[in-house]
């Protein structure tokens, strides 16, 4: 391997959200990797920092070209330059879209369990969440297309927030499924906002399907949010894009992002993205994906041998592991939160409590496997110890 993903980088006392924990805790919760970013990204940031002046920045042609080339080469999607708009982040763009394309008290559709901030983007903007629970079977999720149409047919439903690939379930939605979503959305006049931030973290041999690529119905009735921040561990840089094919929709989104003041790059945003979406960035990412997959396999093997009552869900995408803990939980939010706190206090392992993701999440915990293998192993031992104490109370 060209890159050392085994290095135990000390992130304590660095103002890290993830690592702002007690000294004896291992945080494996928030979607933030414990790996230093690709050398080419670090070099680009260091070069920009060495200039010493950090004024206002523009979005140059090279930024557009980096996104276009990456999606064409690695995801088979042609994106025209004019479709792209810079934004500071996927979630700021999502919240802007909710405000711009819906009115207060209207409904925004989400498929649960799903990334908890989807709820925030709706509720904090005075809109109502409309849940279409995913169907859970045999350790995987699939969309309930019948329920999806029923919910979309509600005249108060104006927008759908799509998580593609799916967080926390790890699913890569098929082209056929996405095509059906597009047909239903167009039929019922529902705009689709597709969050595709996890698209570059897939298992080796697995590729995600861009929502825009599936059909004209999908491409012309969606806002797609994309970014290098998740795959390259640079969330603090605040750099992302939305791709919008339809001209009228794009003009409204562009105006909305500028009105919300989330359309201007910070001084490192362009350089970091361009460096990430390069051949050097892809070489690093390819090794990272293989390393993370080994971590996932370590977790799966450990659970099978040591904690067989815990079921690990699909691991096709993201570095987040969705673990069915129903053997130890009663399916209520109060119980799973008590369990989360117990594991932190008694075993020193900090996992995400599944109830915050809605749907059947109160029977689950989410584990972040994007860390050195030795930390994964230690986290699993702590989990086993914590569960032993939990059941022996």
Image: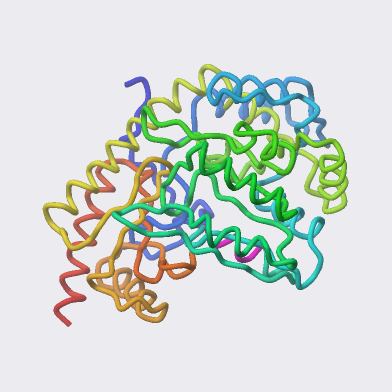
Q: How many marks?
A: 0
| Quadrant of the frame with the N terminus | top left
Q: Please tell me which residue is depicted at 64% across the width and 45% down the height of the picture.
A: 183
41 over 260 or under it: above or below:
above
Residue 198 on the magenta span: no
User: In the image shown, does 60 or 302 lie closer to the viewer?
Assistant: 302
Left or right: 111 as drawn, with respect to 172 = right
Question: Mainly helix, strand or loop, the magenta region?
Answer: helix
Q: Residue at x 67, y 49 (%)?
A: 193
Q: Is residue 300 above or below residue 308?
A: above
| Quarter assignment of residue 366 | bottom left
In this view, 324 is above or below 260: below
- Where is residue 264 drawn, in percent x and y? 80, 41
Q: Residue at x 33, y 57 (%)?
A: 137
Tell me: 231 left or right of 194: left
Along the line of sight, the residue nearer the viewer: 138 or 25:
138
Locate residue 49, reporting x and y percent.
67, 31
- In the picture, the quarter occupied by the C terminus is bottom left
Magenta-colored span = 115-121
Say if the magenta span includes residue 118: yes
Tell me the residue at 49%/68% (across/down): 358
User: Residue lying farthest left?
Assistant: 305
């Amino acid at each position: 391997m060209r890159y050392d993903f085994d290095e135990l980088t000390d992130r304590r006392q660095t103002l890290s959200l993830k690592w702002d924990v007690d000294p004896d805790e291992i945080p494996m919760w928030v979607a933030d990797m414990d790996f230093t970013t690709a050398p080419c990204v670090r070099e680009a940031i260091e070069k920009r920092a060495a200039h010493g002046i950090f004024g206002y920045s523009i979005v140059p042609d090279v930024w557009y070209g980096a996104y276009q080339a990456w999606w064409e080469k690695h995801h088979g999607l042609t994106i025209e330059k004019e479709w792209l708009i810079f934004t500071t982040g996927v979630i700021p763009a999502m919240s802007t879209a909710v405000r711009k394309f819906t009115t207060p008290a209207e409904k925004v559709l989400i498929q649960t369990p799903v990334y908890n901030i989807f709820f925030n983007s709706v509720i904090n903007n005075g809109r109502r969440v409309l849940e279409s629970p995913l169907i859970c079977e045999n350790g995987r999720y699939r969309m309930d297309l019948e329920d999806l149409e029923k919910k979309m047919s509600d005249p108060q439903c104006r927008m759908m927030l799509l998580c593609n690939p799916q967080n926390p379930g790890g699913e890569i939605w098929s082209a056929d499924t996405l095509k059906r979503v597009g047909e239903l959305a167009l039929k019922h006049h529902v705009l689709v906002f597709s969050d595709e931030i996890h698209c570059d973290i897939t298992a080796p041999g697995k590729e995600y399907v861009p929502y825009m690529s599936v059909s004209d119905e999908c491409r012309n009735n969606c806002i797609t949010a994309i970014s290098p921040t998740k795959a390259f561990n640079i969330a603090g840089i605040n750099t992302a894009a939305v791709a919008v094919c339809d001209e009228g929709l794009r003009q409204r989104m562009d105006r909305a992002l500028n009105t919300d003041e989330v359309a201007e790059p910070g001084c490192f945003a362009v350089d970091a993205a361009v460096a990430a979406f390069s051949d050097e960035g892809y070489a690093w990412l390819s090794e990272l994906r293989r390393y993370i997959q080994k971590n996932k396999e370590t977790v799966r093997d450990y659970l099978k041998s040591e904690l067989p009552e815990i079921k690990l869900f699909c691991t096709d995408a993201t570095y987040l592991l969705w673990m069915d803990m129903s053997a130890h939980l009663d399916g209520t939010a109060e119980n799973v939160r008590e369990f989360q706190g117990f594991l932190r206090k008694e075993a020193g392992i900090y996992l995400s409590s599944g109830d915050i993701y809605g749907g059947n999440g109160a029977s689950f915990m989410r584990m972040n496997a994007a860390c050195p293998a030795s930390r994964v192993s230690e986290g699993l031992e702590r989990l086993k110890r914590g569960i032993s104490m939990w059941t022996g109370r």
